[in-house]
Amino acid sequence: MASTNDLKNGMTLDLDGQLWNVVEFQHVKPGKGPAFVRTKLKHVMTGKVVDKTFNAGVKVDTATVDKRDMQYLYREGADFVFMDNDTYDQIHIPATAVGKMSDYLLEGMTAQVSTHEGLPLFVELPASVELVISQTDPGLQGDRSTGGTKPATLETGAEIQVPLFLTTGEKVKVDTRTGDYLGRINS
């Protein structure tokens, strides 16, 4: 149990048996009437975002979410198999919990896995990852200065937009939150 005065971004609340992450919050003290806390909450499983207002000082249930660094090993059917870096235990995480992060996940990569009472909730990758372009069409002569983009398939199978000058086999940095091209990696 925590008070609404203790809310922080990233905190997980247990409201009516469902888990919600606090995306943002704001304490409001109007000139007239009692203070309240305006929050934006994101449902852990579905990703639905709602606005909710609490009276100041009201008790809310907090959920214990265990965040651990785990190494992605391989995919087995619809599940992704991760290994805990501390205990070396292997756990199967359903594709729904991995979500769109599977587009940027390579074997051997370390990710942060959040669990609640042993149930995997979601997987977080670093803000950016480095991946190799497995296929893209060649750029045409004269297209290099126009600033245009073309589709490219990454080694994970994800497709992103890259500048025209990039070729197959080059390593690029990709934003895992938006899927945007961030730059070329010179190795």
Image (cartoon, grey):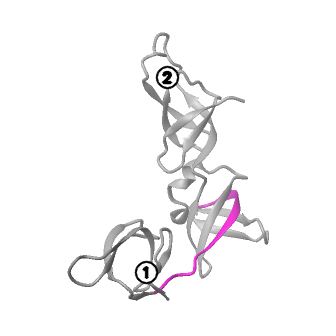
Label 2, secondary structure: give it: loop
**Which mark, residue 5?**
1
Q: Amino acid at mark 2?
A: Leu
Percent across and percent down for residue 168 are 61, 27
Residue at image x 46%, y 16%?
Answer: 145
Question: Which residue has dot 2 on it?
Answer: 164
Q: Amino acid at mark 1?
A: Asn
Residue at image x 65%, y 29%?
Answer: 169
Percent across and percent down for residue 122 are 55, 66
**Which mark, residue 128?**
none
Q: In which image quadrant can residue 52 be found?
A: bottom left
Measured in 3D between alpha carbons, the distance from the residue under mark 1 to the one under mark 2, in whole angstroms, is 51 Å
Q: Is residue 133 above or below residue 14?
A: above
Q: Is residue 139 left or right of residue 36?
A: right
Residue at image x 65%, y 68%?
Answer: 92
Percent across and percent down for residue 25 are 39, 70
Give the residues in magenta.
61-78
